[in-house]
Image (spheres, helix red, strand yellow):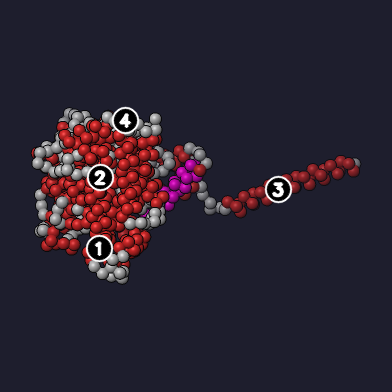
């Protein structure tokens, strides 16, 4: 053998040995990395399912065990179910991250192929084990919340509906009510997300309601529990999810084949009576109960009204209109109106405080991060409906047409509320003023027509206003006249330096006036004014008369009163604007009709004469004004130089009067800017 041939054979053998060594090393490395006992996630899921199914098969058909809950815990059923769902959830999360189809995952495919949902239904039939029932329901909820839509599978959807039906009529349901309502909500949410495929499943074809259609089982089950102490919130959220479906079957089911509307109004009524229970238990005059009277607990009532607000927001127009109609007829014009008119002073104050709370900022929104501003009720239709009932707009004037107060339907309530502004009881007067302040702040055309319209409809006022309206610059000059009067009054009473934070006053005034202009720009005319009721005092008359007794009022009354005046002069309606701001209109009115200019002139003289008798009045007033709340609190505690209670009240009243002038001044300046922007009153053209 030649040397060359021997060298070639040697090289071939060396290469072969090297290849064999590399293959052996790769095999050993793979064995070390994977390990002999490692399983795929599908195999692990199969082990869990097999174990759970063996327990279900062993328990079904046997007599009730003495302690099924303990048996389920001993066999670690909750842990096994949790491990099973963790595998599915991890796979779905990974598929979502990789933007892959979750239905192609090995665990999801096994879940569907091996009928795992059917196994869970078998476990649910062991209804004498409350702990196991809760665990199974939570497992189904987790399965429904997977990214892969299990209910797209028709057999799975029908099986889940059978689960819901079994739970609904289970004798043990009360013991897992919260979990059951959460399950209903998860199911409602899925139907809302895919109504085309799931509505035929959840609308039963086997239950016929008087030949008028099929029963919306899922909706009716949720309605049965939306007032439950445990789970009621889940049931309400489920109902709202279903109401978002734009489908004639849903609308027809809600309006004709369910008790949702009637039960919702009944829930409002019960919540209202619950809020007044503590007050009703202590009937009597206000001076008997005083400040120690029990405060109402309006939380159930506000929760019920918030649900009504959400229904109006998400439901179809037919459903919302029917709900508002029933609420108006059965609660607002019956229960609420009666409680506002009949009862003791304590009850009147409690009811007015509760109603006012509907228009106040919602603490739930303010507690969010970041905080949000908004009323408890958000929907304009509902807010306007409540306000119209309070001011006496008859139901016949809901649409177009001029509202006329009628004693039988609503005028009596408005007159009663107006008279309470002048109540001898300070607490009742403050409650009535707060309620009217909320109504004025709603920016509703018919509400303002009922409040301000009777005064504007008087022949003397109408003639004076009409004369100024015919002048091209009448409205613009009215702004100048009130602004000049406020500036003179600020300088004339006492020489005070411009208060710190004047920019904040002006910014707030611009914000408030611009919001008012945006809300009211569609009803800038004087149409729709309500005719005055003979012998009845109008709202404006009582407010101006109360303002004229400024120095006899309490501090609380004056603070609310000044807020109402500032809101009334903000409105852009020409007739209302001229009545409150025009000095020319005020000069043409007879002496028996009060105007804002006349009242302010009277208050200026009263303030000057009263302050003249106060020793070092200017210094004390300056300290009270500059120190604001701190100075007033010192005076109240006796740490200041003010020894006389009457003098203390006088200084507080003058400070509030100065605040009113400052507020009116900033409102007029803001109104001029908004008129230029909106091109109103002939300005900005």
Image point (37%, 42%), residue name: 670
Q: Where does residue 420 sit, x and y in percent of width and height?
A: 15, 50
* Residue located farthest toward the right when viewing the structure as drawn: 2
Q: Nearer the viewer, mark 3 or mark 4?
A: 4
Q: Nearer the viewer, mark 4 or mark 1?
A: 1
Image point (19%, 44%), residue name: 594
Identify the residue position indicated by label 4 in the image.
472
Q: Residues within 10 Å of mark 3 (few under 14, many from 20)?
A: few
Q: Where 75 falls versus 19 (above or below)?
A: below
Q: Is residue 74 left or right of residue 592?
A: right
| Magenta-highlighted residues | 77-96
Q: Of residues 460 and 51, which is closer to you in this image?
A: 460
Q: Where 474 falls versus 511 (above or below)?
A: above
Of pointers 4 and 1, the one earlier in the residue sequence: 4
Of pointers 2 and 3, the one earlier in the residue sequence: 3
Of pointers 3 and 4, the one earlier in the residue sequence: 3
Identify the residue position indicated by label 2 in the image.
597
Image point (37%, 43%), residue name: 669
Label for residue 613?
1
Element type where label 3 sits in the image:
helix
C-beta proximity under 8 Å, tags 2 and 4 = no
Q: Is residue 90 magenta?
A: yes
């Amino acid at each position: 053998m030649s040397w060359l041939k021997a060298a070639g054979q040697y090289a071939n053998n060396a290469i072969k040995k090297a290849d064999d060594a590399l293959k052996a090393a790769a095999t050993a490395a793979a064995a070390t990395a994977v390990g002999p006992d490692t399983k795929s996630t599908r195999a692990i899921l199969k082990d869990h399912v097999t174990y759970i199914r063996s327990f279900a098969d062993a328990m079904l058909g046997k007599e009730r065990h003495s302690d099924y809950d303990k048996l389920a815990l001993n066999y670690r059923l909750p842990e096994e179910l949790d491990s099973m769902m963790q595998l599915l959830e991890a796979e779905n999360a990974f598929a979502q991250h990789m933007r892959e189809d979750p239905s192609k995952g090995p665990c999801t495919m096994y879940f569907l192929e091996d009928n795992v949902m059917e196994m869970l239904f078998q476990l649910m039939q062991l209804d004498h084990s409350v702990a196991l029932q809760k665990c199974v329901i939570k497992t189904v909820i987790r399965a429904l919340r997977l990214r892969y839509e299990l209910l797209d599978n028709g057999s799975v959807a029908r099986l889940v509906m059978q689960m819901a039906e079994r739970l609904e009529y289970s004798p043990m349901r009360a013991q897992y009510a919260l979990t059951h309502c959460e399950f209903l909500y998860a199911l409602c949410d899925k139907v809302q997300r895919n109504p085309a495929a799931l509505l035929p499943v959840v609308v039963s074809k086997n239950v016929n309601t008087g030949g008028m259609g099929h029963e919306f089982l899922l909706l009716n089950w949720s309605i049965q529990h939306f007032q439950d102490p445990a789970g009621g919130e889940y049931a309400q959220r489920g109902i709202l999810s279903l109401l978002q479906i734009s489908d004639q079957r849903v609308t027809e089911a809600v309006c004709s084949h369910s008790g949702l509307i009637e039960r919702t109004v009944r829930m409002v009524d019960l919540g209202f009576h619950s809020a007044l229970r503590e007050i009703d238990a202590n009937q009597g005059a206000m001076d008997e109960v005083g400040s120690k009277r029990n405060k109402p607990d309006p939380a159930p009532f506000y929760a019920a009204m918030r649900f009504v607000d959400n229904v109006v927001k998400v439901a179809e127009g037919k459903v919302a209109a029917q709900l508002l109609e029933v609420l108006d007829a059965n609660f607002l014009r019956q229960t609420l109106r009666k409680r506002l008119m009949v009862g003791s002073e304590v009850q009147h104050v409690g009811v007015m405080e509760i109603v006012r709370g509907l228009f106040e900022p919602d603490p739930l929104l303010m507690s969010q991060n970041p905080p949000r501003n908004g009323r408890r009720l958000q929907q304009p239709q509902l807010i306007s409906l409540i306000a119209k009932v309070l001011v006496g707009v008859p139901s016949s004037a809901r649409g177009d047409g001029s509202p006329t107060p009628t004693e039988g339907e609503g005028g009596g309530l408005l007159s009663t509320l107006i008279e309470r502004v002048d109540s001898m009881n300070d607490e009742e007067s403050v409650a009535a003023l707060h309620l009217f302040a909320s109504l004025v702040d709603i920016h509703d055309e018919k509400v303002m027509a009922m409040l301000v319209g009777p005064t504007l409809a008087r022949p003397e006022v109408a003639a004076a206003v009409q004369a100024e309206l015919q002048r091209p610059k009448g409205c613009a000059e009215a702004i100048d006249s009130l602004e000049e009067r406020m500036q003179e009054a600020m300088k004339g009473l006492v020489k005070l330096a411009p208060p710190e934070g004047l920019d904040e006053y002006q910014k707030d005034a611009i914000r408030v006036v611009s919001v008012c202009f945006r809300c009211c720009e569609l009803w800038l005319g004087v149409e729709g004014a309500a005719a005055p009721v003979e012998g009845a005092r109008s709202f404006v008359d009582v407010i101006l008369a109360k303002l004229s007794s400024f120095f006899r009022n309490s501090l609380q009354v004056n603070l609310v009163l000044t807020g109402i005046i500032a809101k009334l002069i903000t409105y852009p309606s020409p007739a209302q604007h001229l009545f409150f701001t025009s000095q020319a209109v005020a000069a043409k009115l007879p002496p028996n009709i009060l105007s804002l200019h006349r009242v302010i002139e009277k208050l200026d003289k009263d303030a000057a004469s009263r302050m003249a008798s106060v020793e070092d009045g200017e210094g004390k007033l300056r300290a009270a004004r500059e120190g604001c709340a701190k100075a007033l609190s010192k005076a109240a505690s006796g740490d200041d130089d003010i020894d006389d209670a009457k003098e203390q009240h006088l200084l507080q009243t003058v400070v509030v009067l100065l605040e009113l002038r400052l507020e009116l001044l900033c409102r007029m300046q803001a109104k001029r800017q908004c008129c230029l922007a909106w091109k109103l009153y002939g300005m900005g053209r």
